[in-house]
Image: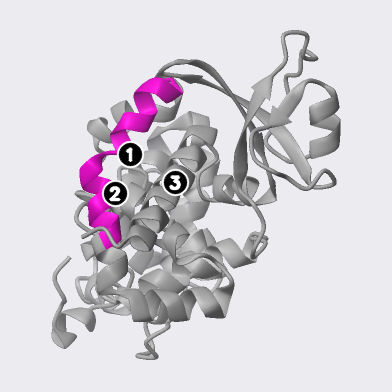
């Protein structure tokens, strides 16, 4: 997204409300263009300390429902692909080499942020690489269109997206570097290089360059610090492992964990027939992850830090892709690859 002029930034919800009031019948006209759910929502935002209801309604009236967004929600890659199909999307030579180049070009910043938050720089780089190809693909949809579409026209997760839309209206200038109606992002309303939802911006994004705004499109300090802070806030353990490949004995205990939290220990998993292929602390909490790989079934012991990656995106395929990309980037840096 190109930087906006100061004059464009000056547009606000209050201005929308003033314009509506000056037209006399504008408020009723706007209200008439939206339904009861939108009017209830506008009142809720105003009651929470956000813009006046008339301003919220004026903004909602600009939104356009996008069928392509509803179609995309019905087919997320994590649910339609196995690991053998998912991995090649993100572990390409180009993405690895671009990640090494991005790390090298911004090494001073990344190392400083990593030191401050206790999150490895290659993890920060890999998240940006998986999410937006290092800032090249940040999303084509207006965030307003995406969140309105999902909040009012996608019943399976309407409550969640209504909450995110509310957060968007409550963010204000400090958290939004650009006017709300100009923000663009993913089909789910995620924004910037790290693809933050409004709640993530409100709770974990950081103004690292000190300009008084959080800019997740054009400020690398803000982008990298926000990703790192997200991981720190969700419990990243500095210096601890993420995952390790395991071999399964022929008589291994039939284990199907109900989630990704590390509720066993390495020692227990090994006793059940799942031996780590790298030296691991026997007392570390872990769990078992099975993936359908290109060469067959893969067994992995995953630790707390793997679980933390799934707080960014709950798919274990996503978490494994981030980790393996990060590992490749770190190896490339160590080897001095161009």
> Looking at the picture, how far across and down is residue 70, in whole percent?
32, 30
- Would you say 86 lies left or right of 303 here? left
Q: Which of the 4 quarters of the picture holds residue 52?
A: bottom left
> Looking at the picture, how far across and down is residue 284, in whole percent?
79, 47
- Earlier sequence position, callout 1 versus callout 2: 1
The residue sitting at 67% across, 36% down in the picture is 260
The residue sitting at 78% across, 8% down in the picture is 251
The quarter of the picture where the N terminus appears is bottom left
Nearer-the-camera pick, 163 or 317: 317
- For disc 1, the marked residue is 91
- For disc 3, the marked residue is 322
The residue sitting at 34% across, 55% down in the picture is 332
- Would you say 155 lies left or right of 214 here? right
Residue 165 visible from this viewpoint: yes
Is 91 magenta? The answer is yes
Position of residue 280 relative to residue 75, above or below, is below
> Looking at the picture, how far across and down is residue 41, in whole percent?
48, 54
**Mark 1 crowdedness (10 Å alpha carbons): few <14, some 14-19, many ≥20:** some
Q: Which residues are magenta?
A: 81-100
Position of residue 209 relative to residue 11, above or below, is below
Disc 1 to disc 2: CB gap under 8 Å: yes
Labels 3, 2: front one: 2
Residue 191 visible from this viewpoint: no
**Mark 2 crowdedness (10 Å alpha carbons): few <14, some 14-19, many ≥20:** many
- For disc 2, the marked residue is 96
């Amino acid at each position: 997204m190109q930087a906006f002029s100061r004059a464009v930034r000056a547009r606000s919800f209050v201005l929308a409300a003033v314009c509506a009031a000056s037209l006399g019948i504008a408020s009723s006209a706007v209200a008439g263009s939206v339904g009861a759910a939108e009017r209830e929502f506008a009142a809720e935002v105003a009651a929470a300390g956000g813009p006046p209801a008339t301003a919220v309604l004026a903004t909602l009236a600009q939104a356009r429902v996008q069928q392509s967004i509803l179609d995309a929600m019905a087919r997320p890659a994590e649910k339609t692909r196995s690991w053998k199909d998912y991995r090649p999307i993100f572990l390409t030579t180009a993405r690895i080499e671009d990640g090494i180049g991005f790390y090298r070009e911004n090494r001073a910043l990344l190392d400083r942020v990593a030191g401050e938050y206790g999150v490895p720089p290659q993890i920060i780089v890999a998240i940006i690489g998986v999410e937006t190809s290092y800032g090249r693909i940040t999303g084509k949809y207006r965030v307003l269109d995406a969140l309105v579409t999902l909040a009012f026209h996608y019943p399976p997760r309407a409550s969640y997206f209504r909450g995110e839309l509310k957060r968007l209206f409550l963010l204000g200038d400090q958290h939004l570097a650009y006017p709300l109606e100009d923000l663009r992002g993913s089909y789910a309303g995620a924004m910037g290089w790290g693809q933050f939802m409004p709640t993530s911006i409100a709770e974990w994004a950081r103004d690292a360059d000190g300009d008084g705004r959080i800019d997740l499109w054009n400020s690398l300090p803000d982008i990298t610090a926000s990703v790192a802070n997200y991981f720190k806030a969700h419990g990243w353990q500095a210096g601890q492992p993420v995952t390790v490949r395991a071999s399964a004995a022929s008589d291994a205990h039939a284990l199907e964990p109900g989630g990704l939290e590390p509720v066993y220990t390495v020692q227990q998993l090994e006793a059940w027939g799942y031996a780590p292929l790298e030296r691991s602390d026997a007392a570390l909490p872990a769990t078992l992850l099975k993936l359908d790989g290109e060469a067959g079934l893969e067994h992995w012991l995953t630790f707390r830090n793997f679980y933390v990656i799934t707080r960014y995106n709950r798919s274990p395929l996503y978490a494994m892709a981030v980790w393996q990309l990060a590992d490749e980037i770190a190896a490339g840096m160590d080897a001095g690859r161009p």
